[in-house]
Amino acid sequence: MENFMSDELLGTFAPILVYWVYSGIYVLLSPFENYRLHPKKDEHVKNLVSKRTVVRGVLLQQALQAAVAVILFSVTSNGGEATNLQPSLLVKARQFLVAMFVLDTWQYFMHRYMHHNKFLYRHIHSQHHRLVVPYAFGALYNHPLEGLLLDTIGGALSFLLSGMSPRASIFFFSFATIKTVDDHCGLWLPGNLFHMLFNNNSAYHDIHHQLYGGKYNFSQPFFVTWDKILGTHMPYSLEKRTGGGFEARPAKDKI
């Protein structure tokens, strides 16, 4: 029980805490128009859902995720045996890469299918796209069924297929959470490591949230590999916007 409290429960609840702390930092930065991908006022003008509703929706999804995580860790627990044995850094790195690939693959195909299936889009996935102008703490604002299919099951598969330990999952799911929040932050900050290391970033995902981008840029949260392989990658340019900030503009031949 002690190990369950230290590793499994941390793996369950640390990503939730990270989500609100990291998105809270972006809330403090959001008034800085010179770094925004959309004017601040557009959050109120273009979005189709209130921030109060978004917070309630995210909390509901996190509650469901936590319940599934507790069940998953309980089922896969080794009963406390050999819990002090941790794999080498090389093995952990391999597990992280496998988990990233599994999560990316699952989310790409599920996400794309939810756009192409008119019923699923209208009744489920369109809830997330009520945020035409994304912001950080709206990253996990989804229909509960989508949260279960896309995020929770995807996370469970990445954990199981990578073979990582509950302790390693604390870091992986916290990292995946930070990356997801960053992709929805609506900001283009100088020196952002995610923008340097990943082509899948806040500008890339912002393209997808616009009306012209609904058939492109399905990849999330890490790489753009599947978009490029399957022809759903939309190139874009990042340009200065009159009045301050930036604008991600798609390639003209894709509109």
Image (cartoon, rainbow, N blue to C red):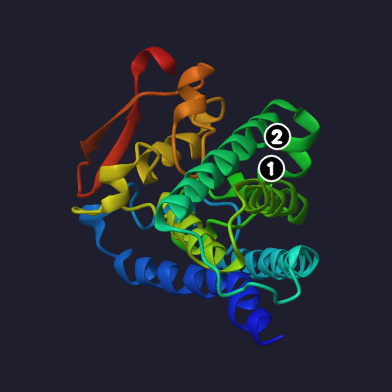
Q: Residues within 10 Å of mark 2 (few under 14, many from 20)?
A: many
> Looking at the picture, how far across and down is residue 140, in whole percent?
59, 57
Residue at 20 percent of width and 54 percent of height: 34
* Mark 1 → mark 2, Cα distance in angstroms: 6 Å
State the SS at label 2.
helix
Q: Amino acid at mark 2?
A: Met
In this figure, which residue is indicated by the disc labeled 1?
Answer: 125
> Looking at the picture, how far across and down is residue 11, in whole percent?
59, 70
Choose between 248 and 68: the one closer to the eye. Answer: 68
> Looking at the picture, how far across and down is residue 128, in whole percent?
62, 48
Choose between 161 and 71: the one closer to the eye. Answer: 161
Screen quadrant of the C terminus: top left
Residue farthest to the top, as pictured: 253
Tell me where residue 239 sits by quadrant: top left
Residue at 78 percent of width and 51 percent of height: 145
- Does the residue at mark 1 contact the one at mark 2 (Cβ under 8 Å)? yes
Q: Which mark is residue 114?
A: 2
Q: Amino acid at mark 1?
A: His
Number of marks in the rendered image: 2
Residue farthest to the bottom, as pictured: 2
> Looking at the picture, how far across and down is residue 243, in whole percent?
20, 48
Screen quadrant of the N terminus: bottom right
Residue 62 visible in image: yes
Tell me where residue 204 sits by quadrant: top left
State the SS at label 1.
helix
User: Is residue 221 shown left or right of residue 7?
Assistant: left
Choose between 249 and 16: the one closer to the eye. Answer: 16
Residue 184 visible in image: no
